[in-house]
Image (tube, grey):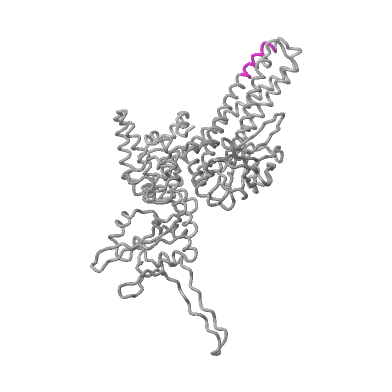
């Protein structure tokens, strides 16, 4: 259940506290209008990351506009007025300080959660009191049964009434327990699984399972205690019974209910804690290469010490819809234990799994989705429960050159669906919106570097994908447009181009990217607009739009003989060139031949006005010092003169 909906169901005493959380800085009306969207954003991350705060703030204004349009259609003048007033207030106060509103919203959401927890704790105390009351009534029943032979008529008149009351309360307790269980498994656990999907594709890190494990284990323990109480009723029935005995009428249904609850809880609590991943590619999980080891970790969130070393997990590939199968090489069975995990969880980690292709299929390899299945059996207190869980869909490749397209499939799947097992997804892939794609693209940088993409950079990428547009929010992007079709005038797709740039950043220019020195994605029109007013020698760094393999270039300002401002760009440097020389060295040593045939550096200030030496000097490789002389006589071989490689443009 959404957090805002839960809050509105609280008692009046808690609602009074809720009202005090909001003010003009973050009106409660806005919280009400945009509740689902507000709860779906990572405000804590935005409060500490200005670029993300800016993105979220502009998305917030966009959401307000959408609500305004809806109320406009409904002819709701009051709501239109309130939304317009709120938007104007937010723009005037936070447009230049988006992190401030992020902090305010993050604080409000945290206080809401604390308020919910306080209310939940109070309910749990009440339930605990109810449980103690039930145990007291059970004791009374036992005493009545002992006196049955002497007080038969008394038992039928008083004991029967008490027993009926007991069964009524027990039925109510099981109903409440069913509600709590659905909240944990259908909402809390489902939310965690969705967050895990997002984390797999570079989104914010997923929270750990320890707190959820505590809740689920506590619920499972309570269910087993209730089951023991119901079994005691069976003992009472065997001791003495009579016509119309409530135990005979109600006990079987109660036992069936509690057993079903426990079975379902155990099945839901068997999860994949860490999705399949090759150790050499930790930032791209869910892509597996045949013949290469990958790891997995499963966990049972019902933490019973008596199950330690009792559950043997078997792993296998589950392939549906395609005429292909895979074999698992290496150890495909392992016993769950608490000793290997840092937090003492009941888990099993598979570190040396290897996939082996047994048959080929006719579909594109990088669009085939497969599941890795984990199975085990639980024997506990006379119950046998079959447990099964699946990894998120994985792509199996046979050559590492298939990695970019395979990763694109993983991005598209986990971006657009929270379905955990839809291996038929790419038979008819759904479309995404630019807002979804933009967020995922930024994650591809922020998850492996210290910097995501700015709004301006994302706008440039949107233009490459969709062409010129005033507002890209809500624009639809097909799977083919993203990954398969060539860009206009190019011989490669958008994703192939961008993936190579990501690789270029991570391997060759990471430090410069983290410093914010690389503007990267910028249109030529925008480039000219920001450089033209600058003095000669001002330059910026951007990614090449013409190189499939990923390249970086720089553009600088110079004046011609007549004093007219001109822009000059160097041929892009590719990965192959950057293998032998750092990009900082290239910038520091770059020269051109002037009209008098003298080598000069055209690069003086990194846009907007950072001296070149200040920006790049610390990243240059130090020059090798000369070797010391081996002797004092004239016959001693002198050291070589120092050399320095520079890039020259005639």
Could you tell me what secondary structure mostly forms the magenta stretch? helix
Does residue 137 sit above or below 243 in this rendering?
below
Does residue 442 sit above or below 261 in this rendering?
below
Q: Position of residue 213 (x, y in %)?
A: 60, 38
Residue lying at 64% horizontally and 21% vertically, measured from the top left: 254
Farthest-out residue, front: 362
Q: Is residue 364 left or right of residue 160?
A: left
Q: Position of residue 431 (x, y in %)?
A: 43, 38
Residue lying at 45% horizontally and 66% vertically, measured from the top left: 618
Farthest-out residue, left: 562
Q: Is residue 381 left or right of residue 556?
A: right
Query: Which sits in the foreground, 290 or 30?
Result: 290
Q: Position of residue 7 (x, y in %)?
A: 46, 32
Picture quarter with the C terminus: bottom left
Q: Position of residue 572 (x, y in %)?
A: 41, 61
Which of the 4 image quarters holds residue 326? top right
Residue lying at 67% horizontally and 29% vertically, measured from the top left: 225
Res 61 visible:
yes
Res 392 visible:
no
Residue 453 inside the magenta-drawn segment: no
Residue span colored magenta = 155-167
Query: Which sits in the foreground, 245 or 440?
Result: 440
Residue 161 inside the magenta-drawn segment: yes
Query: Which sits in the foreground, 564 or 104?
Result: 564
Q: How many marks?
A: 0
């Amino acid at each position: 259940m959404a957090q805002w909906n839960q809050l509105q169901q609280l008692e009046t005493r808690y609602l009074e506290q809720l009202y005090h959380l909001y003010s003009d800085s973050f009106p409660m009306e806005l919280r009400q209008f945009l509740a689902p969207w507000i709860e779906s954003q990572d405000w804590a991350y935005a409060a500490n990351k200005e670029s993300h705060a800016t993105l979220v703030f502009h998305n917030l204004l966009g959401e307000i506009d959408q609500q305004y349009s809806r109320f406009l259609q409904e002819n709701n003048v009051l709501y239109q007025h309130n939304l317009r007033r709120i938007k104007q207030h937010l723009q005037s106060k936070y447009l230049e300080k988006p992190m401030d509103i992020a902090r305010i919203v993050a604080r409000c959401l945290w206080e809401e959660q604390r308020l919910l927890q306080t209310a939940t704790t109070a309910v749990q105390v009440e339930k605990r009191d109810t449980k103690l009351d039930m145990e007291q009534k059970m004791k009374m029943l036992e005493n009545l049964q002992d006196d049955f032979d002497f007080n038969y008529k008394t038992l039928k008149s008083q004991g029967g009434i008490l027993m009926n009351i007991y069964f009524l309360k027990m039925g109510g307790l099981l109903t409440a327990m069913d509600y709590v269980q659905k909240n944990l498994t259908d909402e809390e656990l489902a939310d965690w699984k969705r967050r895990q999907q997002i984390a797999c594709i570079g989104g914010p890190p997923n929270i750990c399972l320890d707190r959820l494990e505590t809740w689920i284990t506590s619920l499972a323990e309570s269910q087993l205690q209730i089951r023991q109480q119901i079994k005691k009723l069976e003992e009472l029935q065997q001791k003495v019974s009579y016509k119309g005995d409530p135990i005979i009428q109600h006990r079987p249904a109660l036992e069936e209910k509690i057993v079903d609850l426990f079975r379902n809880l155990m099945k839901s609590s068997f999860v994949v804690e860490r999705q399949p991943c090759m150790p050499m590619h930790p930032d791209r999980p869910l892509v597996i290469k045949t013949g290469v080891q990958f790891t997995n970790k499963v966990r049972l969130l019902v933490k019973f010490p008596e199950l330690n070393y009792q559950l043997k997990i078997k792993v296998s590939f589950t392939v549906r819809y395609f005429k292909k199968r895979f074999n698992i090489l290496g150890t495909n069975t392992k016993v769950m234990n608490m000793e290997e995990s840092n937090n003492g969880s009941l888990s099993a980690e598979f570190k040396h799994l290897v996939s082996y292709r047994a048959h080929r299929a006719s579909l594109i390899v990088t669009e085939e989705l497969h599941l890795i299945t984990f199975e085990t059996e639980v024997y506990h207190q006379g119950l046998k429960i079959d447990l099964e869980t699946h990894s998120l869909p994985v792509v199996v490749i046979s050559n590492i050159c298939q990695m970019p397209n395979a990763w694109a499939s993983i991005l598209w799947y986990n971006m657009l669906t929270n379905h955990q097992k839809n291996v038929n997804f790419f038979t008819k892939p759904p479309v995404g919106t630019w807002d979804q794609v933009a967020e995922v693209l930024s994650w591809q940088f922020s998850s492996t570097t210290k910097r995501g993409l700015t709004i301006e950079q994302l706008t440039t990428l949107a233009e490459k994908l969709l062409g010129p547009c005033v507002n890209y929010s809500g624009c639809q992007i097909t799977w083919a447009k993203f990954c398969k079709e060539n860009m206009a005038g190019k011989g490669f797709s958008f994703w192939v181009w961008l993936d190579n740039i990501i690789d270029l950043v991570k391997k060759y220019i990471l430090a410069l990217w983290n410093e914010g020195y690389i503007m990267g994605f910028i249109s030529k029109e925008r480039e000219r607009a920001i450089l033209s007013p600058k003095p000669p020698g001002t330059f910026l760094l951007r990614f090449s739009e013409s190189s499939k393999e990923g390249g970086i270039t720089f553009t600088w300002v110079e004046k011609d003989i007549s004093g007219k401002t001109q822009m000059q760009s160097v041929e892009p440097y590719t990965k192959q060139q950057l293998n032998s020389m750092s990009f900082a060295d290239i910038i520091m040593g770059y020269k051109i031949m002037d009209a008098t045939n003298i080598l000069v550096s055209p690069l003086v200030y990194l846009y907007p006005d950072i001296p070149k030496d200040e920006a790049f000097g610390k990243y240059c490789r130090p020059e090798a010092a000369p070797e010391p002389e081996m002797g004092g006589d004239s016959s001693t071989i002198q050291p070589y003169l120092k050399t320095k490689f520079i890039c020259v443009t005639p």
